[in-house]
Amino acid sequence: MTPGLTVTLGPENPRPTPGTPSRYKLQEASASMTYGTPIARVTDNKAGGSGGAKYMRSDYSRRQAFNADSSKFLMNRRDGYWFLYDAKTLKQDGEALPGLAADCEPIWHQTDPDILWYLPNNGWGAKLHELNVKTRTLVKTIDLLPRLKAIWPTANNMWSKSEGSPSLDGRYWCWLVQDSSFKILGIITYDRQEDRILGHINTDVMPDHTSMSPSGKWATVSWAYNRPLGTRSYSRNLTDPHPASPDGQSWIKVHHASEHSDLGLLANGEDVYVSVDYDSPGGQLRYTSLATGQLVDLMPLYDESTGTAYHVSCRCWKVPGYAVVSTYDEYHNDNRSLNLRASPRLKWFHRKVLVLELKPGGRKWVLAWADSDRRDAWAPGNHNYWAEPQATVNNDLTRILFNSTMASEDYLDVETYMLALPPATFPK
């Protein structure tokens, strides 16, 4: 670990009690409660919202918010528009990015900090756009619709359902394809470098999302609420036999469900799927090799009749072998709507931003209290989603964005925060 920053190793015993909630300083670093990790508040939603301004928020744990050199990051406004922020000043950089709206799946180029790829909202029209965010002009558009219609005549939409990413070099992509009524038709993989569709499969069951693994070797398709299908690791072209399939199928199952997850890299460069298996003893957070199907348990999320929701971000591809996990929505089985923040039933990993080492017996470090109240009983409908922390990490594990109400039960009190870590705090 880097001198000058003490990172708390978990599990903590005794478990600290969260102190008086703090919204921290706006765009100015201070020490985070209990753990001392430098933290700054990015947004001023509470003040701005009362004056009629639209709320800003970091989008999602699987979204690579930071560009290639971590000089800029993406934020999403509640009306669906996307904005750049300066990673040093934490201030908004210009007006809304042109062309980007709602579920347009913005993806940063892995080496050019000025290039962003995106799709039309919900993949409508099946075009992959390349935007220069510095000049705010389109560099290139790839229209895949004619080729999709040659496979499925009614094809209209092409996207990952907003949770997928290409390979780290931006070459290989995996998308689901729908008609104009959003009926699922099938899955494709695409080689951007050679501008060709590598393969396709038909399906009449809508996946939760699709993605390509970081190395580009495996396409993943994740079906929610469908145990026979579950989450699968496919060969790159969706048809070649998967080397770990015992009966020569093009896929292996890596999970029987579609939980919150991310695709990451082990220290040796192996692609893995990181998620929780709630059906396992203790509700194990684990990783599964996309190449072999091997399972490795990391930590249980059930503890003494409690449970917690979580999100995973493995976007730290320059420092492979780690995952950032943010937990929220903790409960005890005696009363699932009870707030555990001030209860002795609160566990050491509840309401936290954690770093997990992706290896058997891997270490766990606590960086900060996420401290976001997100309960169905307190926020009707889907509004509670807005308050989930959904921490996301930059490529060298020196910056983490997360959202929090800081213990407020009003989801409209959500702000976005940034944690700062010295380089090589978590070594390669």
Image: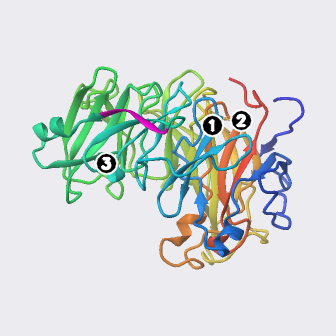
User: Earlier along the polypeptide chain: callout 3 or callout 2?
Assistant: 3
Q: Could you tell me residue 91's position as x and y percent?
A: 69, 49
Q: Nearer the viewer, mark 3 or mark 2?
A: 3
Badge 3 density bin: few <14, some 14–19, many ≥20, Cα 10 Å: many
Magenta part of the protein: which range? Answer: 136-141
The front one of 49 and 136 is 136
* Circle 2 residues within 10 Å: few <14, some 14–19, many ≥20: some
The tag earlier along the polypeptide, 1 or 3, is 3
- At mark 3, the secondary structure is helix
Farthest-out residue, right: 4
Which quadrant of the figure has residue 399?
top right
Q: Which mark is residue 394?
A: 1
Q: Is residue 359 visible?
A: no
Q: Quadrant of residue 397?
A: top right
* CA distance for labels 3 and 2: 32 Å
Relative to 417, residue 396 above or below: above
Q: Quadrant of the C terminus?
A: top right
Residue density around tag 1, few if under 14, some if 14–19, many if 20 or more, within 10 Å: many
Whether label 2 touches label 1, CB < 8 Å: yes
Horizontal arrangement in the rendering, residue 319 relative to residue 376 (left or right): right
Residue occupying image coordinates x 52% and y 71%: 383
Task: Compare residues 317 and 52 and report the one nearer the observer.
Answer: 52
Give the amino acid at mark 2. Thr
Q: Which mark is residue 123?
A: 3
